[in-house]
Image (tube, grey):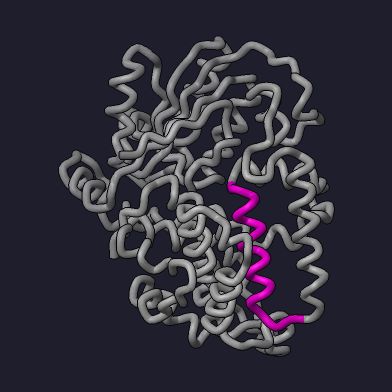
Amino acid sequence: MNWKQLQQLVPSAGQSPDFNACLAAFPQLELAKTTPQNPVYHAEGDVWTHTMMVVESLLAMPDYQQATRAQQEIVFLAALLHDVAKCSTTVIDPVTGAIGQPGHSRKGALDARIALWDGDVPFAVREEICRLINVHQVPFFALETSRRGVTPEFTVRELSWQVDIHLLAMLAEADIRGRICPDPQRILDAIELFRELAREEGCYGQRRVFVDDHTRVKYFRGAEAHPDYSLFQEPGSHVIVMSGLPASGKNTWVEKHHPRLPVVSFDDARIALGLKHGKNEGQVGDYAEERARELLRKGEPFVWNATHLSKLMREKTLNLLYKYHAQVELVYLEQPRKELLRRNGQRDTSLSNKKLQSMLWNWEIPLPMEAHAVRYCVD
């Protein structure tokens, strides 16, 4: 299944969805037919029944019908795949019989990313779909202050740097209209208020504007700040943080663009310590971090070259860099699966192709608000 074929799944005006073609394109959805849901919130039944209802509700919405073709393709595929991971995250309480699917949004984004990557979906389109899946339930509760004390304004501003809130609200509304649950109007009202707050913030269909990148980074990392008022920036190193699967071309990119900068690298640390990939990773990390601290204390620019594949892995690095007031540029690289495996097979490395592919289950692309600048170098 390629991108042109996936585009043909999206019905034109007046057409009905071809659900058999959708199942053929994404075989994992077959499992949705036998995946149960909590009957309190999904009295319609299994996940596939719900998915079909969501898609049909989406197609009937005036917002969808008035959207551009490109927007329709994104939100249609997000609706089709929004619960793709419920089959692998279902938990049934052995005592009460209660059904839950914890983490299905995040896992669904990962599953969708791999499927769409193999389908050669354009990077920007793919990531918009995956980000929508990852946060598709947030509008239900966005007007409530979260458990970590995040205000509705913060939530809306942060979401605007991840997705098109216009499309997110459309998906959330279809998700509610495509189910049988208690008091759906209450949640539909919450989604409409979510839209209004985004409009008030100037980020309905666009990112919330910040006075500068430093203020934005500090704000999203929890500083007491306002997007319109600049925070003082203390001097620090300029650090380029690489991100991407092994064999995606990070070393080549660094050599081409920054051949004179010092490089902090886990691979170099492994060589210095005489360790194979996957062995004593804690020791490797400590070695690399100490080298980074030396450069940060001096305020020198450098490159941190590692996979930084998951948000958790990047956060550990970013926490250290921001502690030393660094200005960070994240550079993400990517290649098709076939090319990655070809390159990796030709490298002198202890990382097998099997291990490389197992890393896909932690594959989270850097978000635009993680650093002062984020570059996506994708062919």
Magenta stretch prevailing secondary structure: helix
- Residue found farthest to the left: 346
Q: Position of residue 167 (x, y in %)?
A: 60, 55
Q: Which image quarter is the N terminus in?
A: bottom left
Q: Residue at (62%, 67%) from the top-left corner?
A: 61
Q: Position of residue 174 (x, y in %)?
A: 63, 69
Vertical position of residue 35 compared to residue 372: above or below: below
- Residue found farthest to the front: 14
Quick check: 305 left or right of 329? left
In the picture, residue 221 is in which quadrant?
top right
Vertical position of residue 366 compared to residue 20: above or below: above
Q: Residue at (65%, 43%) from the top-left corner?
A: 160
Res. 287 in view: no
Q: Which residues are magenta?
A: 163-181
In the picture, residue 212 is in which quadrant?
top right
Vertical position of residue 294 compared to residue 86: above or below: above
Q: Position of residue 107 (x, y in %)?
A: 52, 63
Of residues 211 and 113, the one nearer the viewer is: 211
Quick check: 356 left or right of 56? left
Quick check: 293 left or right of 165? left
